[in-house]
Amino acid sequence: MEIDPHAAPLSVTARPELTGGRRIGVLLSHGFTGSPASMRPWGEHLGALGYGVEVPRLPGHGTTWRDLNEHRFGDWYAEVAATFDRMRADHDQVVLGGLSMGGTLVLRLAADHPGDVAGVMLVNPAAASKRLDLKALPVLKHLIAGFPAIGNDIKREGVDEHGYGRTPLKAVHSLVQAWPHLQRDLAAVTSPLIYFRSTVDHVVDDASEPVILDGISSTDVTRVRLPDSYHVATLDNDADLIFDKSVEFITRVTS
């Protein structure tokens, strides 16, 4: 199946001479219906500073929305978990970062590997929702393949995240089904964490933040508000703030 050129994974080799002689890795995960395009500027920024960066393309993304409907949460998690295993073997420490569903995935990783994650960076992560229509997914997914998506939720004009124009219902139901399992295991997350949250987000509502921050066991938690960005904040007006604060965070938690 043809892959959108914008969805190509990003891989940057660590340069320890720029990071105090140690190989520091950063794994960044894109979100549901998105692609590595939404994380590439962030990854390239970190790579230029000497960090080893991996931005995998999650199964079913960067192709067609119908292809995504053939994949489930376990497929996406397996991809980031395999990437994490490779990075642990090649780096002294690894920091995780995720946008939207990417946040769900890296929180799952941090819960499963609490002693191996140096830090967690979340941008508008999804772990819960107040949307009532999600309760109808068990039935709707058998009647309708997809709904129109809220794509390109970006305040900055002229920016394209190169995501899908429809939301595949079987796939999104799989994501929603993963939330309760993650919520039950959030207490296993002990790594330092930085939480970036847009003031206006038309995709992820305000249910996730208290669920995550009240559920984790991390004692080192930093909140950063993004006042001039919508959901895909890594490509929006506050992107530089995310990049700068993440560098400060990574430097501190891996020192």
Image (cartoon, rainbow, N blue to C red):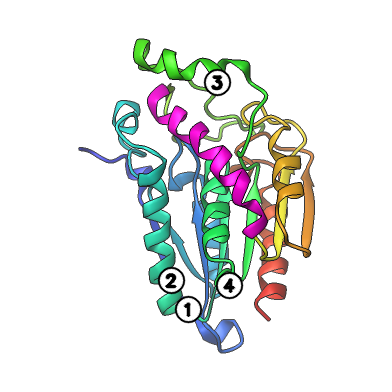
Q: Residues within 10 Å of mark 1 (few under 14, many from 20)?
A: some
Q: Could you tell me residue 8's position as x and y percent?
A: 35, 50
Q: Residues within 10 Å of mark 3 (few under 14, many from 20)?
A: some
Q: The residue tagged with tag 1: helix, strand or loop? A: loop
Is residue 208 in sight in this rendering?
yes
State the CA–CA distance, disc 1 to disc 4.
15 Å
State the CA–CA distance, disc 2 to disc 3.
35 Å
The residue depicted at 38 percent of the width and 70 percent of the height is: 86
Pick the quarter of the image with the N terminus: top left
The residue depicted at 49 percent of the width and 22 percent of the height is: 149
Q: Mark 2–mark 1 contact, CB under 8 Å?
A: yes
Relative to 141, residue 227 above or below:
below
SS majority, magenta? helix
In the picture, residue 163 is in which quadrant? Answer: top left
Q: Mark 1–mark 3 contact, CB under 8 Å?
A: no
Q: How many marks?
A: 4
Q: Mark 1–mark 4 contact, CB under 8 Å?
A: no
Residue for badge 2: 87
Q: Amino acid at mark 1?
A: His
Is residue 56 in sight in this rendering?
no
Q: Which residues are magenta?
A: 169-188
Q: Residues within 10 Å of mark 2 (few under 14, many from 20)?
A: many
- Chain-order first, disc 3 or disc 4: 4
- Chain-order first, disc 1 or disc 4: 1
Left/right of residue 195 with respect to residue 203 in the rendered view: right
- Chain-order first, disc 1 or disc 3: 1
Q: Residue 134 has which mark?
A: 3
Q: Which of the two marks, 2 or 3, is nearer to us in this view?
A: 3
Q: Which of the two marks, 1 or 4, is nearer to us in this view?
A: 4
Q: The residue tagged with tag 2: helix, strand or loop? A: helix
Q: Could you tell me residue 138's position as x and y percent?
A: 44, 19
Q: Mark 2–mark 3 contact, CB under 8 Å?
A: no
